[in-house]
Amino acid sequence: MIELRRDHQPTYSTAVIAPSAVLTLAGDCQSARLARQFVREYIACHVPGASTDHVDRVTLVVSELVTNSIRYGTEPGDSLRLVLDADGGRTRVEVHDPVRRRPRTRPESGVRTRGRGLLVLDALCPGTWGVDNIPLGKSVWAEVPA
C-alpha cells in the first residue's frame, strides 16, 4: 500500500513573464512615447544591472528612430515594428517600416529645427548603425554600447 506523506505541502511558483522583444506600433505621434516606455521595461527585465545612462541613451535612440519612421517611413494607416535585443554589452534597436527610402544625413544647421536624428545616432552609436532592406520595407538599426 502507498502511504501519502501529510507533512509535505506542494509548492507553487508564479512565472515571471518577460516583455516581448517586439512591439508593433501605429504610425502616429503617440507611438514614440509607447516605444520609450517599452524599451525601459525591456531593459529593466533583460539587463537588470544596466546603468541609468545606458537606459537613457537607448531610450533616446529609440525615440529618434521611431519618430523618423513615423515621419518619413509611414503613411496614414501604416504600422511600424520595434525590435530589441540586449545583453550586458550592448542593446540593439531595430525599427522596421514599409517605406524603402533610406534616411540621409543632412548638413548641420543652426536654423533648422528638424533633421538632427542621424547626427544623434552618429554621436550615440558611432559606426554601429545602419539601414537594411527587409521584404516589406526597411530596417533602421543601431547598437548602443553598455
Image (cartoon, helix red, strand yellow):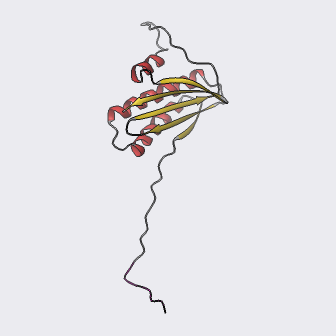
Above or below, comparing residue 11 to residue 6 in the picture: above
- Nearer the observer, 127 or 47: 127
Q: Can residue 132 be seen in this view?
A: yes
The structure residue drawn at horizontal position 49% and vertical position 32%, both measured from the top left corner, is 93
* Quarter of the figure that contains the C terminus: top left
Residue 96 location (% of width, % of height): 58, 30
Q: Quadrant of residue 76 in the image? A: top right
The main secondary structure of the magenta stretch is: loop
**Of residues 26 and 84, which is closer to you in this image?**
84
**In this image, 52 relative to 136: left or right?**
left
The spot of residue 81 in percent (x, y) is: 58, 34
- Give the residue displayed 48% in from the left and 38% down from the top: 85
Residue 28 in the image: state x and y as whole percent.
Answer: 58, 29
User: How many numbered discs sit on the rendered protein?
Assistant: 0
Q: In this view, does 143 lie to the left or right of 133?
A: left
Magenta residues, as a range?
1-8
Could you say where residue 38 lies in the image, as x and y percent from the top left? 47, 39
Nearer to me, 126 or 51: 126
Q: Is residue 121 above or below residue 110?
A: below
Return the residue nearer the eye: 43 or 71: 43
Is residue 30 in view?
no
Compared with 28, 14 (above or below) is below
**Which quadrant of the figure has residue 54?**
top left
Residue appearing at x 48%, y 18% in the figure: 118
